[in-house]
Image (spheres, rainbow, N blue to C red):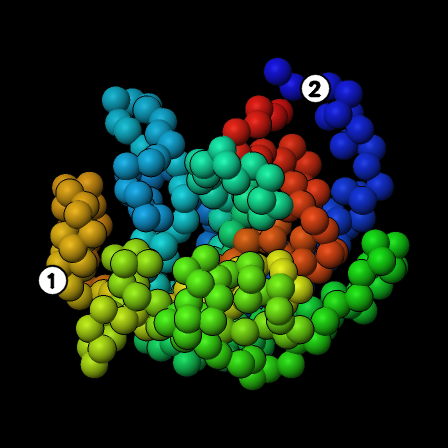
Amino acid sequence: MIDLDIFLAELESPRLKLAISVQTKLISLIRQFLLQEGLKELLPVIISPITDPLTDYRVRSEVECYGFKYHITKSMIFHKQLAIKLFDRIFCFSPNVRIESEERKNSGRHLIEFVQVDLELRYANREQVIGFGERLFSFVLGKIAIEAEPELKSLGRKLPPFRPPFQRLTYRQAVLDYGDDFELKLSADLKEPIWIVDFPEEAREFYDREDPERPGVLVDMDLIYPEGFGEALSGGEREYRVERIRERIARKGIDLQAYGIYLDLAAKGLYPSAGFGFGLERLTRFVCGLQDVAETRLFAKKPGIFSL
């Protein structure tokens, strides 16, 4: 059951009002930067026969209509790869639904419904999208510190510096320094953001491109926020050759039929590309210095908790 008193208190929360005001300005700044860079904005895909496996391809939210089964979008990764056949640089504010484990309800970082800013660049490599991400975050965070100064002052928030180029750390070194679950421990030590690069194949999905010179190492990256806020964005180069995609799916132990439509389209040709996605609510949480990502949107849905 929904606790109506708690729900009504959220509707009158001064902190939530400030966070959404900041978020509105963030959306405008993100769109401003991406349009200036020549990207075309796509409308989001809400349901599709295929969606991101995100480690476990069996965990899906489904809806049936007209006798067909659709999956509710976890991310637009496959649609981005297809969309760059039309435009060479695209982005989308994509609503995503991911059924997280109930143990994550108090993580402060997880919602089962959120918005991801997704972008993809045709013929780009990892170095190029890392540079793009540094310019994007530096622009947005530099501008928001000025444009949302009254809100941030009310929240008691002073943003740390975002001066590119950001330092880099390999996944292997991060594990050696902080252990297998390194993200939050590393983030807590940071005063400025850092890139994690070269994830092992088993840690990511089949669409991330394997380095041909280093089998088992992927040409991808995550950006980590400082001050303990965790992951900022995630992305990398995409696998576009159908025979390699089939091989990677099989190595993951996934039934090829689950991605039959995607494989048929890949067989007709995909462009090499790279891109990334980042959570709008997590960015808002970081900018506002909030403890819980649920404080960044109305009607927030945390794992395992029933909400309007």
Q: Nearer the viewer, residue 34 or 12?
A: 12
Three-letter residue code for mark 1:
Glu
- Disc 2 is placed on an element classified as loop
Q: Quadrant of the N terminus?
A: top right
Question: Image check: 168 left or right of 72?
Answer: right
Question: Image check: 44 left or right of 80?
Answer: right
Q: Is residue 31 visible?
A: no
Say above or below: 105 vs 228.
above
Say above or below: 233 vs 14.
below
Name which residue lies at 56% across and 37% down. 105
Q: Position of residue 99 (x, y in %)?
A: 44, 36
Three-letter residue code for mark 2:
Asp
Q: Quadrant of the C terminus?
A: top right
Q: Position of residue 169 (x, y in %)?
A: 46, 77
Q: Earlier in the sequence, mark 2 or mark 1?
A: 2
The reply to whether dot 2 and dot 1 touch (C-beta < 8 Å) is no
Q: Residue 283 — which label?
A: none
Question: Image check: 97 left or right of 257?
Answer: right
Quarter-wise, where is residue 86 in the image?
Answer: bottom left
Query: Which residue does the numbered mark 1 point to in the structure image?
Result: 243
Q: CA distance from mark 2 to mark 1?
A: 52 Å
Query: Which residue does the numbered mark 2 point to in the structure image?
Result: 3
